């Protein structure tokens, strides 16, 4: 508990936790209408990494059989095994209501995720209101790279997303409850900020909360085994990079997983990364 409080204080002292820079994928003046994936501008992402794309009135607009929308496009590695993809749409005065396609360079749809995969999450630390989808993706064989396309649907523009009233969030943080503060309706729009976080498999992420007995026994079994070198290297590197990127909640989550797996150096790497910021 003391460590978590210290980290929050450090975040404030550093004038806010840093986030990934925002990039724009704008329309080419000679290509007003984009109909194929090959025409799209894509942000190439590494493993692991966090990439943020701003969707504006000047953003590229894809029109084909599946999509008629501004799009944020990410090129992801497809020859590295299982991937964990976290897609976030930030909620401000409006929100880009997201859907996701994973396609090949020639437009073949490999996987699709509708809005049911996204859940609303309240503000936390340096994170505001947002819609988030945590996706486990297994790239099929034969592809070096694939493309994640985040888009919206025209029918979604007439709807709203409800977010918690900030006064109620503050009250809940103080241990109070104020039911008279109703949720706020946020309109959907064609603009917004989309974030894609890509990492390798999170070994404990598939365990659902209702499987508590299984979760406990699985974690204990893993602790009893010596972690593989690749697994240890992944967690130590990811913890360090998460702290450097200012994503303290993710770093803490990875630290908890690493401890459950018996990775002894995780705590030391975490503390050194925090002190180095």
Image (cartoon, rainbow, N blue to C red):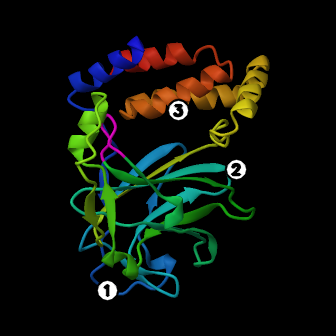
The answer to which of marks 2 and 3 sits earlier in the sequence is: 2
Question: In terms of secondary structure, where does tag 1 sit?
Answer: loop
> Of the numbered discs in the image, which one, if any, rests on residue 32?
1
* The N terminus: image quadrant: top left
> Which residue is label 3 attached to?
238
The answer to which of marks 1 and 2 sits earlier in the sequence is: 1
Q: Main secondary structure of the magenta part?
A: loop
Q: Is residue 137 magenta?
A: no
Q: Give the image quarter of residue 272.
A: top left
Asked if residue 228 shows in the view, the reply is no
Question: In terms of secondary structure, where does tag 2 sit?
Answer: loop
State the separation of the CA atoms marked 1 and 3.
Answer: 40 Å
Q: How many marks?
A: 3
Q: Position of residue 32 (x, y in %)?
A: 31, 86
Q: Give the image quarter of residue 254.
A: top right
Instruction: Tell me what residue is drawn at x 25 percent, y 48 percent.
Output: 165
> Which residue is label 2 attached to?
81
Q: Tags 1 and 2 in contact by the CB under 8 Å rule? A: no
């Amino acid at each position: 508990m003391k460590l978590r409080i210290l980290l929050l204080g450090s975040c404030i002292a550093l004038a806010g936790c840093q986030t990934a820079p925002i990039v724009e994928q704008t329309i080419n003046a000679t290509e007003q209408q984009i109909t194929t994936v090959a025409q799209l501008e894509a942000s190439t992402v590494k493993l692991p990494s966090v990439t943020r794309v701003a969707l504006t009135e000047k953003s590229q607009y894809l029109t084909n059989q599946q999509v008629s929308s501004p799009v944020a496009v990410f090129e992801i590695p497809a020859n590295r095994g299982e991937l964990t993809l976290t897609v976030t749409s930030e909620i401000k005065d409006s929100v880009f209501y997201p859907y996701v396609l994973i396609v090949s360079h020639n437009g073949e749809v490999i996987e699709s995720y509708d809005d049911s995969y996204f859940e609303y999450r309240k503000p936390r630390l340096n994170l505001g209101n947002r819609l988030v989808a945590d996706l486990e993706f297994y790239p099929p064989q034969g592809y070096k790279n694939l493309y994640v396309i985040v888009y919206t649907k025209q029918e979604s523009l007439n709807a709203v997303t409800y977010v918690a009233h900030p006064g109620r969030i503050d009250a809940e943080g103080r241990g109070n409850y104020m039911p008279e503060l109703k949720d706020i309706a946020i309109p959907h729009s064609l603009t917004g900020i989309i974030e894609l976080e890509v990492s390798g498999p999170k070994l404990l992420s598939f365990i659902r909360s209702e499987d508590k007995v299984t979760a406990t026994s699985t974690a204990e079994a893993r602790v009893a085994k010596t972690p593989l070198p690749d697994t240890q290297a992944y967690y130590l590197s990811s913890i360090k990079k998460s702290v450097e990127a200012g994503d303290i909640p993710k770093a803490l989550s990875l630290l908890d997983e690493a401890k459950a797996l018996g990775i002894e150096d995780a705590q030391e790497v975490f503390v050194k990364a925090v002190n180095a910021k």
